[in-house]
Image (cartoon, helix red, strand yellow):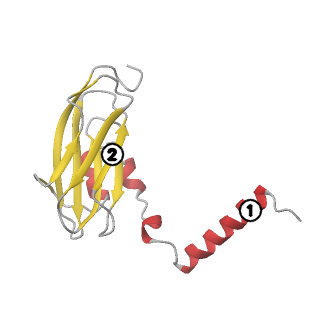
Amino acid sequence: MKTTRRQTLQQSAAVAALLATAGLLPRTALAWTPAAFEAKTVADALKAMGAGAPVESKDVTLTAPDIAENGAVVPMGVATTLANVKLLAVLVEKNPSPLVARFDVNESVEPNFLTRAKMGQSSDVYAVAITNDGKALFSKKEVKVTLGGCGG
């Protein structure tokens, strides 16, 4: 008897549920923090991720253009040379939801990520590194948007 795609998907879902119940899935698979992505300010997003008051640092690097010709697709990068970093994040201050991306980091992962974000207007962009003890270190840059990403 041939197994259908539907049966395979149902079996996969059942196995995933069993692994989750048994606590055998990686912690990062369970580390979803919707409150951080639903936050309306940079400070609220950082608080939801378990960060303390942010401090500017030269050890956190933000790569973003000075001028984004199209706000619908703005390339951004975040990296750090700090030790004991648990996550890196990219936030856009004037976006309706400031948290653009969150990257979980451990000793096996190089803390260097690239992404693209939608920006509706010119804004400060933050690259934030949060350490295992909850310290938040950041770098920021103003990105000017000439054509809005939200229909502008």
Disc 1 designates what residue?
8
Quadrant that contains the C terminus: top left
Tag 2: residue type?
Leu
Residue 17 locus on image (x, y percent): 62, 70
Q: Nearer the viewer, residue 80 or 50?
A: 80
Direction bottom: furthest residue? 22
Query: Is residue 139 toward the left or the right of residue 16 in the image?
Result: left
- Quick one: label 1, few (<14), some, or many (20+) residues within 10 Å? few
Q: Earlier in the sequence, mark 2 or mark 1?
A: 1
Query: Is residue 74 toward the left or the right of residue 22 in the image?
Result: left
SS at circle 1: helix
Residue sitting at x 33%, y 68%: 108
Mark 2 near mark 1, Cβ–Cβ under 8 Å? Answer: no
Quadrant that contains the N terminus: bottom right
The answer to which image quadrant residue 11 occupies is bottom right
Residue 49 locus on image (x, y percent): 31, 59
Q: Nearer the viewer, residue 45 or 61?
A: 61
Q: CA distance from mark 2 to mark 1?
A: 34 Å
Q: Is residue 82 above or below residue 57?
A: below
Residue 55 locus on image (x, y percent): 12, 54
Residue sitting at x 39%, y 48%: 38
SS at circle 2: strand
Count numbered badges in the picture.
2
The answer to which image quadrant residue 14 occupies is bottom right
Q: Is residue 32 above or below residue 25?
A: above
Residue 82 locus on image (x, y percent): 17, 62
Tag 1: residue type?
Thr
Disc 2 designates what residue?
114
